[in-house]
């Protein structure tokens, strides 16, 4: 027996009722890019802009989820996919609740991003935070690239593991050309348009 | 290597900022009780009351989570605990985001409820939805008690697996004595008091 005795409890409140209460549609903003590309930093600034406008926003990332929900997962390929799957399921719940959820995950493989999109359907914005490996290596705020190049971290995206550039993201934020502040403003505008109630 | 290269990205938005936007404090309302005690039904009615008052509310339960986030879990003792752990972690995220989350889980063991409380800290209300096994057997809306008594469902709480009555819940809703509507009103009042901003 796995899920055969499970039935849904339909509510008396619809997704649209929740959206009306919050004055916005729920949306999952999935930010992909190399480590140190600027994903989480842009998310922090974007959250600040949106909260200042009275929007209901929440921010999750690979780092903080791994301290809680995903604390049982390691870094095997299987666990990396499971990390993304659970993050995407959490996004789907938040979107259903009516929130704007900013999710920053390296998610290096196209199949990981497809999985995430699949869970949230058409309430999903894929944002490619663009910076090449050389730039990220120079930034290296946590010293991870240095360790990866010294062979101390196995399978490090961009060094010893591939990053598949998204072929058709909904938005590209090029952090080599634009400031974090500019990227956050562009992203906030995109989100405001997307989450507006008709 | 497990989590040694993980650091938190502190935001520029605090939990209190999120609470101010929503006009409420986040709270996890954990509803425990036998199958057919009325947990999910009360949650549905309570959600309706609170949404009608403009509150930001979301509802999760063992059933709907098992179709998504917890779809990889079965019903072994280990998986039942993992089901509760993940539900509690999701509650903690929702509470941090500022929402009222109504979580209905049989959670038959005191240790499961302790685990859930541990994740959300002092933003947790334990609600015991009270109805004895005989009453639940008579209701049996899904025919599960009948199957359990016929030996078709192993380890069924109240029949072939124990339910540990909560010794000191924050609220008891006795569905043998009170109507669903009355229980929902009592619970909504409790939540409104608890989630009010000072």
Image (cartoon, coloured by chain):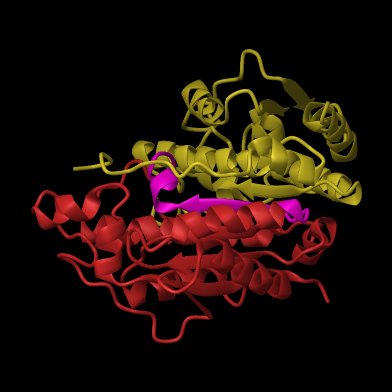
Chain colours: A red, B yellow
**Image spot of residue B94 (x, y percent):** 62, 44
Q: Compared to B191, does A123 lie above or below?
A: below
Asked whether, in this view, residue A20 is left or right of residue A77, the answer is right
Q: Residue at x 41, y 40 (%)?
A: B82
Q: Nearer the viewer, residue A26 or A191?
A: A191
**Residue at the farthest top position:** B167
Q: Residue at x 54, y 26 (%)?
A: B113
Asked whether, in this view, residue A138 is left or right of residue B39, the answer is left
**Image spot of residue A71 (x, y percent):** 35, 41
Q: Quadrant of the N terminus of chain A?
A: bottom left
Q: Residue at x 56, y 26 (%)?
A: B117
Does the magenta run of residues contain B88? no
Q: Quadrant of the C terminus of chain A?
A: bottom right
Q: Quadrant of residue B106?
A: top right
Q: Nearer the viewer, residue B171 or B118?
A: B118
**Residue at the farthest bottom position:** A168
Query: What range is drawn magenta here?
Result: A52-68
Does the magenta run of residues contain A67? yes
Asked whether, in this view, residue B145 is left or right of residue B153, the answer is right
């Amino acid at each position: 027996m796995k899920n055969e005795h499970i039935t849904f409890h339909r509510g008396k409140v619809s997704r649209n009722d929740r959206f009306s209460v919050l004055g916005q549609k729920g949306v999952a903003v999935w930010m992909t890019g190399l480590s140190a590309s600027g994903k989480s930093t842009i998310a922090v600034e974007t959250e600040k802009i949106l909260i200042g406008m009275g929007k209901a926003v929440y921010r999750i990332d690979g780092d903080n989820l791994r301290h809680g929900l995903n604390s049982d997962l390691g870094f095997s390929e299987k666990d990396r996919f499971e990390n993304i799957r659970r993050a995407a399921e959490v996004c789907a719940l938040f979107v259903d609740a009516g929130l704007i959820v900013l999710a920053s995950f390296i998610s290096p493989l196209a199949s990981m991003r497809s999985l995430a999109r699949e869970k949230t359907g058409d309430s999903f914005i894929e944002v490619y935070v663009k910076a090449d490996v050389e730039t990220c290596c120079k930034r290296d705020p946590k010293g991870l690239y240095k360790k990866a190049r010294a062979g101390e971290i196995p399978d490090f995206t961009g060094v010893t593991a591939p990053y598949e550039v998204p072929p058709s993201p909904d938005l590209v934020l090029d952090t080599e050309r634009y400031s974090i502040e500019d990227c956050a403003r562009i992203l906030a505008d995109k989100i405001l348009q997307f989450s507006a109630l008709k």
